[in-house]
Image (cartoon, rainbow, N blue to C red):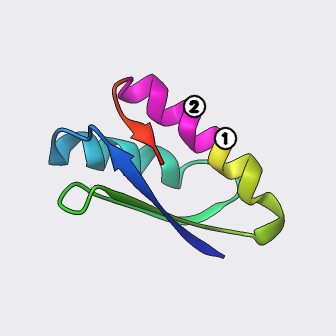
Amino acid sequence: MKKTYRLENLDCANCAAKIENALKKLDGVSDASVSFMTQRMTLECDDSRLDDVLAKAKTVIRKLEPEVTVR
């Protein structure tokens, strides 16, 4: 399943790339992309693991860029 989320307060393309690289390494994620221009994050994973993957993604984002919020 591919799901897209809005990222608030994403300030630069470098931050987006850093988040994207970390998300791709998460267990259960088949693909991830983060766009600074559109302020969007797309996660691709199994339907059954979506909640778990999203929780892990939020934790990683909070650790790397504390001011970024996932909506």
Element on which disc 1 rests: helix
State which quadrant residue 57 falls in: top right
> Residue 2 appears at what percent x and percent y?
58, 74
Q: Residues within 10 Å of mark 2 (few under 14, many from 20)?
A: few
> Residue at position x 35%, y 28% from top?
65
Q: CA distance from mark 1 to mark 2?
A: 6 Å
Q: Is residue 63 above or below residue 20?
A: above
Q: Residues within 10 Å of mark 1 (few under 14, many from 20)?
A: few
- Helix, strand or loop: magenta stretch: helix
Q: Nearer the viewer, residue 13 or 38?
A: 38
Q: Is residue 71 above or below residue 1?
A: above
> Residue 42 appears at what percent x and percent y?
46, 65
Look at the image and tell me in which quarter the N terminus lies: bottom right
Dot 2 corresponds to which residue? 59
Q: Is residue 58 magenta?
A: yes
Q: Is residue 60 magenta?
A: yes
> Residue at position x 34%, y 26% from top?
67
What type is the residue that disc 1 sits on? Ala
> Residue at position x 68%, y 50% from top?
53
> Residue 4 appears at what percent x and percent y?
49, 66
Numbered circle sitting on residue 55: 1
Q: Which residues are magenta?
A: 56-66
